[in-house]
Image: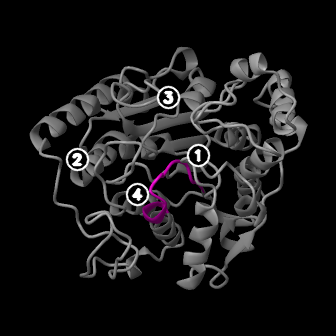
Amino acid sequence: MAEWEAVFLHDAALDRDGYPEACPFNTRRAGKTLEMAQSMGFVGSGGRAVVAPQRLTREELERFHTPAYLDGLRRAGDGELHPDEALRFGLGTPDCPIFRGMYDYVALAAGGSVTGARLILEGRTRYAFNPSGGFHHAQPANAAGFCYVNDIVLAALELADAGKRVFFLDIDVHHCDAVQDAFYARRDIMTASLHESGTSLFPGTGFAHEAGVGEGEGYTLNIPLPVGAYDRIYERAFREGVLPVLRAYDPDVIILEIGMDPLAGDPLAHLHLTNNVPADIVTAVRGLGKPVLATGGGGYHVENTVRGWALCWSALCGEDHTHDLAMGLGGVMLETSEWAGGLRDRVLLSDAGRRDEVDAEVMRAVAEVKRRVFPHHGLA
C-alpha cells in the first residue's frame, strides 16, 4: 500500500525567493494554493501530505541540459555572466530575467517534479502535484518563456529509464515545444498538447501536422485552439481527439501539466475557459487508474490560478465533487475573485462571439489528429 494517496510538493523557499516582482510569472502562486487547499481540508488528512522537493544535482540536470548552459545559469545568478553569454543562453529577457540565486531556485522548483516521479516509482504515492513545476519551454542550452530548467523532460526521463511508458498531457495555453522536441522521435514517452494556436501565441509551434518522426511517428499529438475557444469545444477536443489515444497508449504513468493560463481573463492569452475544464480533465485522467504526476505551469491572473490549482488538487485527490456549481457571483465570469460558490467557476456562457468559427477550426484540428495519429494506436 502507498505511504500517501497524494503528495503536494512544496518548500517555503519557493515562496521566499523566486522571480522578480515585475515578472508576470508569480512564483508565490504555489504557496497560496497550498494555503487554500489546507484551509479547505485537502492537505494533512486522508493520506494527503506536503512533501519537500529535493533540489536537483548538477549530474541530474545534465541528463537534459548542457554543461555550458548550466555554468552560465549559475554565473548569471551570481551576477557574473557576460551580456553576450546571456543573449546566447536566453537570459536577461523580460520573460527569463536574471535574479540572485536563480540556479539553486530553479533546481529546487524542477526537483519537485523529479521527486514526484521517484515517489511514484517507489510506490509511495499514486498522485503527486508540483505547482512550482511545468517549465516546458526550457531547451537543453537556453531558457525561454519563463522556463530555465525543463522539469517535465527530466521527470519523464526518470520514469522512462525505470522502464515506464509515459504519456505527457499538457493543457497549458502555450505549446510544450521543448518537451515535444526532446521526445519527437520516441514512442516510450508520448506528448499530447491542447494549446492556443501558434498563429496567435508564443512559441509559434504545435500544429496538428506535427505528429512525430521515425520511431516516434504518431506519438506526438497537437490540437491548436483558436482565439475564443470556450469550455464545450475544448472538452469535445479532449474527449474526441486526446482521450481515445490516451486509453489506447495505455501508459504506466501520466504526467499532466495544468497551467491556468487558458482561463478567461488571463492577461497573456486569449482563450475563454472556466476552471471547470482543467478540473474535469484531471478527474478524467485520474479515472484511468494510472499514477499521475501533475505540475503547474502558466497562469498570470494570480487569484484565478490559485483557485484553479486548488480545485485541480482536490480533483486529483478525488474530492472535486464537493465543489458543485453553487450559485454565487464572481470567478472568471465577472473577472473578480469575490466568489461565493466554492472553488469552481460558474458556467461561462460567452464564447467571444465566434462560436461557429471556433468550432469549425477546432474540429479541423481534431480531424487532422485522427488522420495522422489515430492509426498508429489502432484507432479508426
Task: Give the mark nearest the N terminus, 4 or 1.
Answer: 1
Residue depth check, mark 2 versus mark 3: number of the one nearer the observer: 2
- What label does residue 233 carry, if any? 2
Rendered view: 185 above or below 123: above
Task: Give the mark nearest the N terminus, 2 or 3.
Answer: 3
The residue under label 1 is which amino acid type?
Cys
Q: Name the residue rendered at 66%, 27% in the picture.
A: 139
- What label does residue 219 carry, if any? 3
Rendered view: 237 above or below 46: above
The residue under label 3 is which amino acid type?
Tyr
Q: Name the residue rendered at 61%, 50% in the picture.
A: 253
Tell me where residue 349 appears, x and y as whole percent.
16, 60
Residue 180, image quadrant = top right
Tell me where residue 129 appears, x and y as whole percent.
62, 61
**Gap in Å between the C-alphas at discs 4 and 1?**
25 Å
Q: Is residue 150 left or right of residue 269?
A: right
**Gap in Å between the C-alphas at discs 4 and 3?**
23 Å
